[in-house]
């Protein structure tokens, strides 16, 4: 039997409560033994949802939780600016860390965080949960197998991040440079950008336009970007928190076919003669398309 890992949750907001629920219901080899928040109301909220048990120790200071020796790992789910200092303290005390994204709001803070981690043999990761969905894993495998041939272009539209003005008003740090570090690009869209990185590797060049069009906030709520990959093909990217109902769509066009993902469904349009160039196949036989669904 695998040894259970004792976990402490630092931050009991919406995401922190979500992590507790996931650990309780879906991760049997982990045990939530401690929780922390500076706001007493958060404990009552979590308790009212049945997420806290009498066995879970409660702390108002992350330092006291980490120093308690109750945990082998912590999940850091606080406002963004606090991720580095909490994670670094945990590393120095010998605890594994899962940090919510982003790990920091400045490059220098992120670099310091990574330097401290590299001094240890501990586990460290950030929460990019879209890598764990079956359709995105299938796309990754499909690309690794080269079934689309040479990639020609990618288009990604991710507008299912609708946020109302009330969302920003409920937490005063949201949508502010000091409290959040940025808006859409640092809070919601990193999930989508991480998928692009995971599927296609680092970018060679990026040009982008960001704007604040839909909310009364300091930071951006819309981004349009043109990305040139190191392999040479272009990626067009659009995202916003001001559109309803919103879409989550990706088109990946290659020399042997096209993959289209719409939400959690994906279809692959390939050519019967996979070795032929797309242009030749189109002109010689328009009926050779196959529709294959995952």
Image: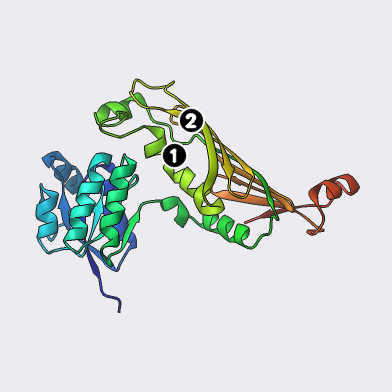
Q: Position of residue 163 (x, y in %)?
A: 39, 30
250 relative to 224, above or below: below
Which secondary structure lies at badge 2? strand
Identify the residue at image location x=51%, y=57%.
134
Which residue is depicted at the point 17% across and 48% down?
47
Q: Which residue is mark 2?
A: 223
For residue 241, which quarter of the picture? Answer: top left
Closer to the camera in the image, 282 or 24:
282
Quarter where residue 155 is shown: top right
Question: Is mark 1 in CB contact (under 8 Å) with mark 2?
Answer: yes
In this picture, residue 149 sits left or right of residue 133: right
In the displayed structure, would residue 193 be above or below residue 33?
above
Element under disc 1: loop
Coloring basis for residues: rainbow
Q: How far from the left and from the top, in percent, is residue 270?
A: 74, 53
How far from the left and from the top, in percent, is residue 185?
A: 41, 36
Q: Taking 154 as reference, is 290 left or right?
A: right
Residue 1 found in image quarter: bottom left
Which residue is the site of mark 1? 189
Q: Nearer the viewer, residue 62 or 200?
A: 200
Whole-Å distance between the Cαs marked 1 and 2?
9 Å
Asked if residue 108 shows in the view, the reply is: yes
* Label 1 vs 2, first from the N-terminus: 1
- Seen from this angle, which residue lies furthest bottom? 1
Pointer 2: residues within 10 angstroms few (<14), some, or many (20+)?
A: some
- What's the residue at 26%, 47% (across, down)? 77
Near-viewer residue (249 or 117):
117
Number of marks drawn: 2
Question: Which residue is at the far right?
Answer: 284
User: Left or right of 89: which side holds 146?
Assistant: right
Q: Kindly tell me whether residue 51 is visible in this rendering.
A: no
């Amino acid at each position: 039997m695998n040894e259970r890992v004792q976990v402490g949750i630092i931050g009991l907001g919406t995401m922190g409560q979500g992590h507790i629920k996931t650990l309780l219901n879906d991760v049997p080899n982990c045990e939530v033994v401690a929780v922390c928040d500076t706001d007493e109301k958060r404990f009552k909220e979590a308790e009212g949802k049945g997420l806290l048990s009498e066995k879970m120790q409660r702390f108002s200071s992350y330092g006291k939780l980490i120093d308690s020796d109750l945990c082998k790992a912590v999940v850091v789910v606080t406002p963004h600016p606090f991720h580095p200092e909490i994670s670094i303290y945990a590393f120095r005390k010998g605890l594994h860390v899962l940090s919510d994204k982003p790990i920091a709001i400045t490059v220098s803070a992120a670099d310091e965080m990574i330097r401290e981690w590299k001094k240890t043999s501990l586990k460290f990761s950030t929460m990019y949960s879209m890598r764990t969905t079956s359709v995105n894993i299938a796309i990754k495998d499909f690309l690794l197998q080269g079934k689309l041939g040479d990639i020609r272009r990618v288009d990604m539209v991710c507008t299912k991040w609708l946020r109302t003005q009330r969302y920003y008003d409920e937490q005063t740090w949201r949508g502010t440079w000091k409290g959040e570090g940025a808006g859409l690009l640092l809070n919601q869209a990193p999930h989508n950008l991480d998928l692009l990185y995971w599927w296609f590797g680092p970018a060679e060049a990026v040009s982008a336009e960001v704007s604040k069009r839909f909310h009364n906030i300091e930071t951006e709520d819309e981004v349009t970007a043109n990305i040139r990959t190191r392999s040479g093909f272009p990626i067009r990217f659009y995202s916003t928190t001001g559109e309803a109902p919103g879409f989550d769509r990706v088109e990946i066009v290659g020399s042997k076919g096209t993959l289209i993902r719409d939400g959690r469904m994906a279809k692959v349009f390939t050519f019967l003669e996979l070795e032929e160039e797309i242009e030749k196949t189109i002109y010689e036989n328009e009926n050779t398309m196959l529709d294959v669904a995952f």
